[in-house]
Image (cartoon, rainbow, N blue to C red):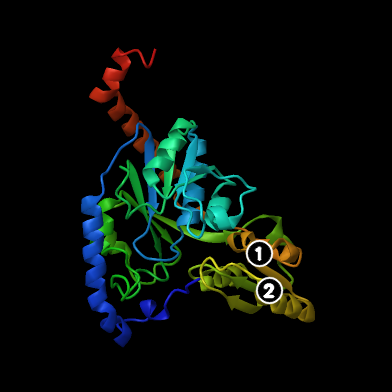
Amino acid sequence: MIKTPKFWYHGDTLLSKILTPLSYVYLTLSILNRFLTKTRSLDSFVICVGNAVAGGAGKTPATLYLAKLLKKLDCNPHVVIRGYGGQEQGPHLVSNNDPFSQVGDEALLLEKQASTWVSKKRYKGARAAVEAGASAILLDDGLQNASLKKNLSFLVVDGPRGFGNERLLPAGPLRESQKSALSKVDAVILIGEDRHNLTPRFQNLPVFHGSLRTVGSVWENLKKKKIIAFAGIAHPSKFFETLRQQGCALIGQRPFGDHHPYQGSDLRPLIQRAAEEKATLVTTEKDFIRVPTKYQSHITPMPVELVIEEEKALLKFLKQSLVQFEEDQKSSPKLKLKKRSGLFS
C-alpha cells in the first residue's frame, strides 16, 4: 500500500511544482465527474463525515464518535462506507466474521459501534440501510461524492498537519480546494493542536475541538512497560505521538503504508525484537484487523477514541439538525402525498 508522500507536508518543494500541471488535470476531471453525477435524496437524515485531504484526518474516529452521540438521541445510525481495500461491491451489511480483504479494515472497526454497510455506490448503500431500519445515515468519507444529498456535513481536519502544502493532488494532499470543501459543510471537527492557525479560515462555521486518547484496561496494563509500536495508517506518526502523549515508554516504532496487509516477514522481526527487549508490541485496532491470526497472540491492539471538548454543544447541534430535518419532512409535498395515499396509516 502507498505511503503518504512526505513532500505534501514540507512546503512548496520542487517536486510539488513539477506535479502542479497534473493537479489541473485532476481538477478538471473532478469537476466533470460532479457535473455528470446525478444527486439523489432519501427520506432519512444523512450525515457526511469527510475531509479535504487524501489520507487520514480522523474520519473513522469521528464517525464512531458521532454514531455514539446519535444513539444518545435515540437514533438508529447506520454507517455507509466505500470499503477501501476490500473487494466487496455491495451493498453488503458488514459482519465481524467478514475478512478485511472483502470489506476493508475500517468497515470492521466501524461495525463494532453501528450497523455498517460497504457499498461502492453510496446511494445504493444508503438506500439498503434505510430499508433495514436506519433512522440516520453516517456517510464515511463522502464529501467529494455527489451521488447522495446530505442533510448535515462535517469537515474533519488534522490540526498538526492542516492542509499540507495546500496544493491539489498529486502536487499536494488536497482532494479539492479549501474554499470548495468549506462551502459544502455545516461544521468542522478539528483534531489535535491547531499548529497552522486554521481556525480563522473556518469563518462562521461551528468548530468542535477533539483529541485522540488511549482507552480501556489495555492502557492501564501498559503504563509501566516498555513498548514497541507499529502502524500502517495514513500518518503512523500520529499513533506514535498519541502513545507518547499518554506517557508510554516507547522504545521503538515501525511505520508501514496505509492499509498495509501484514505478512510474517513484516511481523517476525518486530516480535523477535520485542522479546529481546522484554517489551510489549502494540498497534492500532485497525492494524490489528490486518494481522494474520497466527501472530495476533504476540501483539496488543491499543484502542484509541476521539474525545470532543464541546460534547454537549455538539449533541445540541445534532439534535437541532435532526429536529429541523423532521420539520422539513413534515412540510414536504412528497411526504403529504404519501400520507394521503395511506402509506403512513
Q: Position of residue 132 (x, y in %)?
A: 49, 32
Label disc, if present, on residue 291 of the rendered structure: 1
| Of 212 and 76, the residue lying toward us | 76
Q: Quadrant of residue 290?
A: bottom right
Q: Residue at coordinates 28% horizontally, 29% vertically from top-left?
A: 328
Q: Position of residue 340 (x, y in %)?
A: 29, 13
Q: Describe residue 146's horizontal placement relative to residue 89 as left or right.
A: left
Instruction: Pick whichever of labels 2 and 1 is earlier in the sequence.
Output: 2
Q: Residue at coordinates 35% horizontally, 70% vertically from top-left?
A: 173
Q: In the picture shown, does residue 99 fall above or below 279? A: above
Mark 1 falls on what kind of element? loop
Q: Let me know if residue 331 appears in the view.
A: no
Q: Let me know if residue 343 appears in the view.
A: yes
- Circles 2 and 1, Cβ within 8 Å, touching? The answer is yes
| Of 271 and 293, the residue lying toward us | 293
Q: In the picture shown, does residue 187 fall above or below 256? A: above
Could you tell me how far apart the alpha carbons at marks 2 and 1 are, in whole angstroms? 9 Å
Query: For mark 1, does the 10 Å Cα neighbourhood hold few (<14), some (14 to 19), or many (20 or more) residues?
Result: many
Where does label 2 land, which residue?
A: 267
Q: In the picture shown, does residue 333 fall above or below 224? A: above
Q: Position of residue 131 (x, y in %)?
A: 45, 31
Q: Quadrant of residue 265?
A: bottom right
The kind of residue on which mark 1 rests is Val
Q: Describe residue 303's horizontal placement relative to residue 170 as left or right.
A: right
The kind of residue on which mark 2 rests is Leu
Q: Residue at coordinates 30% horizontally, 87% vertically from top-left?
A: 14
Q: Quadrant of the C terminus?
A: top left
Mark 2 falls on what kind of element? helix
